[in-house]
Amino acid sequence: MRKLAAGNWKMNGTGADLAEVAALRAAHPSPAVDILICPPATLLSRLSQAAGPAIASGGQDCHAAASGAHTGDISAAMLIDAGASYVILGHSERRADHRETDAVVAAKCQAAWAAGLTAVVCVGETEAQRDAGQTLGAIGAQLAGSIPEGAGPDTLVVAYEPVWAIGTGRVPSPEQIAEVHDFLRAELTARLGPRTASGIRLLYGGSVKPDNAAGIFAVSNVDGALVGGASLKAADFSAIVTALEDAPV
Ligand code: 13P
C-alpha cells in the first residue's frame, strides 16, 4: 500500500496560490508516498496542470447525478475532465452546511465510482458524541451508510476526521486515534474481507501540522493524513509529506 498525504484547501485559494503547488512539486519530484491536493473547483484545472505527474488532484464534492438541472453543482465526470482523480465526499463541513446524510454521500460515491474517481469518504464524531461515549457507534453508522457495495483499495480511501479536531488545534491522543483506526479496519474487514480491507488507505484528519505529523503517522492503521490549513502553504505540507515518507511501515 502506498500511503497518502492529502490536502483539502476547502474554500481557500486563487490563481496566485498555484505558486505553492509549484513549490511542492519542486520539493517532491518523486515522492515515496501519494500526494493529493483538493483545491476549490475554480482552480482544479489549472492546479492539475501545475501539479505535474507526481501530485494528484481532486474535487471536494460531486453531485450524485451524471448531469442535469442542478445549478451550482459539479458532476464526477466534470471533475475528471478538469484533471481530478479523487473526490472528497461527506466531509463534516458538507454534512453540516449542506445537510448531507449518509445516503446522500453513498449516492455521490456511486457517481464518483461510475466516472472513475477514487472517493475519500469522511467520517468522524462530534465532541458531544465523544463525551457521550458514542464515538465508535457514530462512526460505524457513518461508515456503513456512506459507502456503497463494491469498495476496494483503488476506489475508496476513508478519512477519520473528529469534528472537534478540525481547525481547532486540538488533536486526539495516539490511543484515541488508534482506537478509531483499528475499528475502521475491523469494520472494513468484516464487510469486504481481509484482502480488500487491508489495502484501503485510512487517513487521519484534524489539525495535522508539521510538528505533530510524525506522532500521528506512527499510530497503527494510520496510512496518511487529510490536511486542511497546513496544506495551503508548500513549506508546511511538504514537511507533512516528508514525515509520512519517514513513518514506520
Ligand atoms: P484542519 O487541518 O485545518 O484542521 O482541517 C482538517 C480537515 O477538515 C481536512 O479535511
Image (cartoon, rainbow, N blue to C red):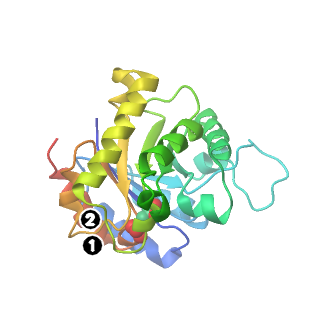
Label 1 CA crowd tier, 10 Å (few <14, some 14–19, many 20+) = some
Q: Can residue 240 be seen in this view?
A: yes
Residue at 23% over, 55% down: 174
Q: Nearer the viewer, residue 201 or 114?
A: 201
Indicate the quadrant containing the C terminus: top left, top right, bottom left or bottom right: top left
Residue at 18% over, 59% down: 214
Q: State whether residue 18 is above or below residue 173.
A: below
Answer with left or right where residue 57 lies relative to residue 218. Answer: right
Mark 1 lies on residue: 235
Q: Can residue 85 be seen in this view?
A: no
Residue at 42% over, 53% down: 133
Answer with left or right where residue 171 lies relative to residue 65. Answer: left
Answer with left or right where residue 14 lies relative to residue 23. Answer: right
Amino acid at the residue labelled 2? Ser
Indicate the quadrant containing the N terminus: top left, top right, bottom left or bottom right: top left
Residue at 47% over, 67% down: 9
Quadrant of ligand 1 in image: bottom left
Mark 2 lies on residue: 238
**SS at mark 1?**
helix
Q: In which quarter of the image is residue 147?
A: top right
